[in-house]
Image (spheres, helix red, strand yellow):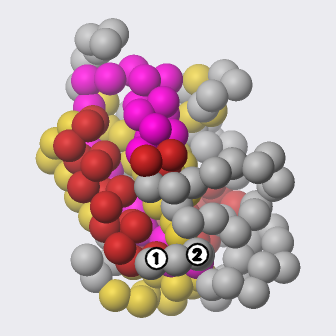
Amino acid sequence: MNFIETQRACFLIGSNLGDRLGLISKAIGMLHQKLGDNIKVSGVYATAPWGTHSPEEYLNIAISLDTHYSPLETMQKALQIERELGRIRTGILNEPRSIDIDLVLFGAVTLNTEVVTVPHPRMHLRKFVLLPLSEIEPHMVNPVLQKTVGEMLAECTDTLPVEIFTHI
């Protein structure tokens, strides 16, 4: 582990196959256990698939936590959790999936590698990311766009339906 100053890591977790709520709940617990503490969890949102014609509706949730891991280590642990929960990546963009864990913000850090890009380069275009994230971290700033989550949500032109489903 590369010990770093504590950073606030923000994730979007989504699922549209299988026991969606169960998988999301397990992912939250595993992220909390493996990565950090001081966790915040948004409501669960039902969303239409973005960038695909898949008929399966997604459930999405945002979480944030404090971690001492680097962004790369954080994403590697998230990918391991996906595998442990049965995710198989086929390489098809926006395919249906049992679980998807995206690291969308990592404090004020910017990073672009083959494994992770933070902030997530398309987060400001996706209401299904911004709406749940605005519940828990509305004042967190995207260091590339220099806008808060709340500001990005107010400016987002995404018209796909995003509705509260439940709370975990």
Q: Is residue 106 above or below residue 98?
A: above
Q: Is residue 49 above or below residue 2?
A: below
Range of residues picked out in magenta: 58-81
Residue reaching furthest top? 2
**Where's residue 92, x and y in %?**
82, 54
**Where's residue 74, x and y in %?**
41, 31
Mark 2, other Cα within 10 Å: few <14 / some 14–19 / many ≥20: some
- Three-letter amino acid code at the position of disc 2: Leu
Secondary structure at numbered mark 1:
helix
Q: Residue drawn 31% across and 46% down?
A: 31
- In the rendered image, residue 75 lying in the magenta stretch gets the answer yes
Q: Residue drawn 51% across and 40% down?
A: 79
Secondary structure at numbered mark 2:
loop
Query: Which mark, residue 20?
Result: 1
Q: CA distance from mark 1 to mark 2?
A: 6 Å
Query: Which mark, residue 17?
Result: 2
Quarter holding the C terminus? Answer: bottom left
- In the rendered image, residue 71 lying in the magenta stretch gets the answer yes
Residue 155 located left or right of residue 109: right
Q: Residue drawn 49% across and 23% down?
A: 72
Q: Depth check: give the residue in front, 47 or 131.
A: 47
- Three-letter amino acid code at the position of disc 1: Arg
Quarter holding the N terminus? Answer: top left
Residue 109 visible in the current orientation? no
Mark 1, other Cα within 10 Å: few <14 / some 14–19 / many ≥20: some
**Where's residue 139, x and y in %?**
36, 53
Are the two marked residues, 1 and 2, in contact with CB atoms closer than 8 angstroms?
Answer: yes
**Where's residue 14, x and y in %?**
52, 66
